Amino acid sequence: AKKLGGAQFQFYAQDMNLRTLDRLKLEAALRHAVERDEFELHYQPQLDMASGVIDGVEALVRWRRPGHGLVPPAEFIPVAEETGLIIPLGDWVLRAACAQQAAWRDAGLGDLRMAVNLSARQFKQQDLAQSVVQALHDTGCAAGRLELEITESVLMEHPDAATLVMEQLSDMGVKLSIDDFGSGYSSLAYLKRFPIHSLKIDRSFVHDISCDEDDAAIASAIIALAHSMKLNVIAEGVETGQQLAFLRREGCDHVQGYYFSRPLPAAELALLLARPPGQ
Ligand code: C2E
Ligand code: CA
Ligand code: CA
Ligand code: CA
């Protein structure tokens, strides 16, 4: 039994080495990816429920890694977070998204709300507000068109520091939204205290909205809560007509999901924007 254990250990250790190696390669490649301009943003439309018009987009980063194709964020954002590379990457995302917002506006395609995801590490940067000011200034995107998405867990971790940063951003006119709302724990008292503009109902509740009574109840409660606090509410992960019908009945303000469109490269999103509504 001991021998077998040894063999198993060796097998495991080899496997570990491989994984460590992959991880080191990933880190090294990621380290140069910003300088080499290997990232791109895809944009997923957000529709105003009442008019059916695309009035915003969420910017979602992808990595065109040589030899690996288009890498989804789940495969590199956590590593970027751990290594601190998320700071230069996040700054690139912010600038690229703001520049795109201004470009579409100047091309007459609409003055869209541009939603950008912020990671925990970025949010803890003392000079976050300064980076945002700089990005807006350099790109010509209006502060009021930028919406920063932050998850509940990030807010709840350091509520005092979070309040300060959010107030700075909010004073500049930048909008703030809580991403994946309902999936973590949030204190309703904090909701009142943070200068938040909108709540984003987590995809997991939207998924079973039309067949699971509990999820339907949670989604309805989030919409009612948001409205009672005069917040905008947006549902993500809308994939079916039934989900949309439910959200419409409950008065959800904005919707986003595969039912309307996947996240698209800028050029493809521009085609959607150029199309008259309803077509
Ligand atoms: P998220 O912020 O919750 O973004 C929504 C994710 O749901 C996106 O995945 C989007 O493609 C996907 N999605 C949209 N509609 C549907 C739908 O109808 N059904 C389903 N099943 N999924 C849908 P994506 O692009 O792979 O991004 C995953 C996560 O990576 C994001 O989750 C966000 O947490 C993170 N992320 C993406 N871009 C950035 C970024 O620039 N900075 C940071 N810090 N995180 C990012
Ligand atoms: Ca998001
Ligand atoms: Ca989300
Ligand atoms: Ca999510």
Image (spheres, helix red, strand yellow):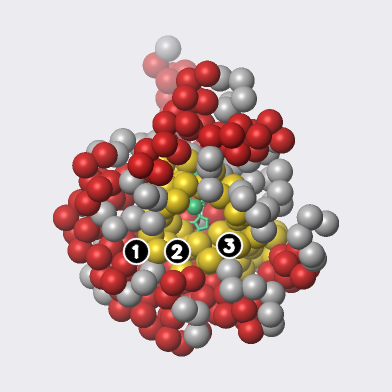
Q: Amino acid at mark 1?
A: Gln
Which badge, 1 or 2, comes first in the chain's sequence? 1
Q: Which residue is mark 3?
A: 56
Percent position of residue 9, x then y = 43, 29
Residue 85 appears in the figure: no
> Going by the image, does 116 lie left or right of 100?
left
Q: Which residue is mark 1?
A: 122
Q: Nearer the viewer, mark 1 or mark 2?
A: 2
From the viewer's side, name the closer residue of 79 and 48. 48
Decide: marks 1, 2 in contact (CB < 8 A)? no
Percent across and percent down for residue 212 are 56, 19
Relative horizontal placement of residue 236, taking residue 156 as reference (left or right)? right
**Mark 1 and mark 2: span between their CA atoms?**
15 Å
Q: Earlier in the sequence, mark 3 or mark 2?
A: 3
Tell me the quarter of the image containing the C terminus: bottom right
- Picture residue at 65% right of the left edge, 54% below the top: 51
Spatial CA span between label 1 and label 3: 23 Å
258 is higher (above) or lower (below) than 164: above
Residue most extreme to the right? 279
